Image (tube, rainbow, N blue to C red):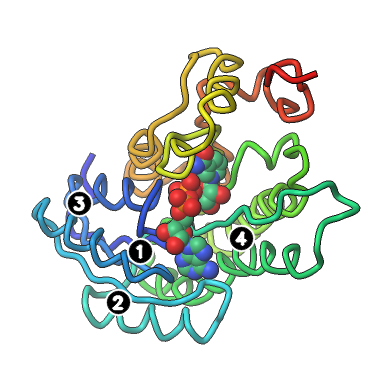
């Protein structure tokens, strides 16, 4: 499976799943366009180039439509039209019981996790349709299926992203554009590896594979969904969680699994 000749745009590529996905895309021969609010995304571009692929980056905020339009224009200028879009940028900044969830935090999660992908899709999808080829992959979460204890904003936006995915399919499928959602379980990104080990181990222990996933495992799934070969996969919601959805969706509320009374 090759992505040679394709230009792949990834939001949230300064670290974590986005950065790992950029490196998988480079290994598959794609040109890699990176969009992030953090200047450290430049290091991802350097790593992609060091792997032998073309890269460019733009700084901006996915929740701001004007910032997205300007960033995408600069990236198209540098690397050519976007064939594949990975809506990966996402935040969890809002951990509190529902009744005490701050309105600003709720709005910010909707802005980044849901309006962000909406902005990114609108910046590229008509061009994909005109060229008759497009792949959009929205990074949702296992939280879209069963919620996430004390993270109502995050869970609601990740479920909303499935609705956005469905509508892109309905409106653009006949034009050669597919849109799929990827639902990761706990993935060992820098942030997750910095969590207290007992919390991470509790999740891993309740997962049939008994470990967290790696960012590059998610990147390989995304790369396949971007390929020519994946053209009949459309509107899918693909779990990548080691089977964790089978018994851990309410983990945060099952304190005995976290060793608490
Ligand atoms: N890590 C996990 O266990 C896990 C599990 C399920 C789903 N996810 C989802 O996968 C995606 C990536 O997660 P991660 O763990 O790699 O996250 P991360 O926090 O490590 O990285 C997120 C990246 O997005 C960027 N970003 C954040 N807000 C932005 C904005 N407004 N505009 C542009 N860029 C922005 C950050 O700068 C960062 O580079 C997210 O959508 C997340 O919800 C992650």
List the residue tagged with mark 3. Answer: 26
Dividing the picture into quarters, in which one does residue 176 lie? bottom left
| Label 4 residue SS | helix
At label 1, counting other C-alpha atoms closer than 10 Å, the crowd grade (few under 14, some 14-19, many 20 or more) is many
Residue visible at 24% across and 75% down? 80
Locate the N terminus by quadrant.
top left
| Residue at disc 1, secondary structure | strand
Q: Could you tell me which residue is drawn at 33 percent across and 38 percent down? A: 216
Residue 9: assigned label: 1
Q: CA distance from mark 4 to mark 3?
A: 25 Å
Work out whether 158 lies above or below 177: above
Q: Position of residue 62 (x, y in %)?
A: 52, 71
The answer to whether mark 2 and mark 1 are in CB contact below 8 A is yes
CB under 8 Å between discs 2 and 3: no
Contact flag, marks 1 and 3 (Cβ < 8 Å): no
Disc 2/disc 3 C-alpha distance (Å): 16 Å
């Amino acid at each position: 499976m090759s992505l040679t000749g394709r230009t792949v745009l990834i939001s949230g590529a300064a670290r974590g799943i986005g950065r790992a996905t950029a490196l998988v895309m480079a290994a598959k021969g794609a040109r890699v366009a990176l969009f992030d609010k953090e200047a450290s995304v430049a290091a991802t571009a350097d790593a992609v180039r060091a792997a032998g692929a073309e890269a460019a980056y733009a700084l901006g905020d996915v929740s701001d439509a004007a910032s997205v339009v300007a960033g995408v224009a600069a990236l198209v200028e540098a690397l050519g039209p976007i064939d594949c879009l990975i809506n990966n940028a996402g935040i969890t900044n809002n951990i509190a019981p529902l009744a005490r969830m701050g309105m600003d935090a709720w709005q910010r999660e909707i802005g980044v996790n849901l309006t962000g992908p909406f902005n990114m899709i609108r910046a590229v999808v008509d061009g994909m349709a005109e060229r008759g080829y497009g792949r959009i992959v929205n990074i949702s979460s296992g939280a879209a299926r069963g919620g996430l204890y004390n993270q109502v904003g995050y869970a609601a936006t990740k479920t909303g992203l499935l609705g956005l995915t469905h509508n892109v399919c309905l409106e653009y499928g006949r034009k050669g554009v597919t849109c799929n959602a990827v639902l990761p379980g706990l993935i060992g990104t820098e942030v997750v590896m910095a969590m207290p080990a007992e919390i991470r181990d509790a999740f891993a222990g309740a997962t049939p594979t008994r470990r967290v996933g790696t960012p590059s495992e998610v990147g390989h799934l995304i790369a396949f969904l971007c390929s020519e070969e994946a053209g009949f996969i459309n509107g899918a919601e693909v779990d990548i969680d080691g089977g964790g959805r089978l018994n851990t969706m309410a983990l945060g509320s099952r304190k005995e699994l976290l060793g608490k009374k």
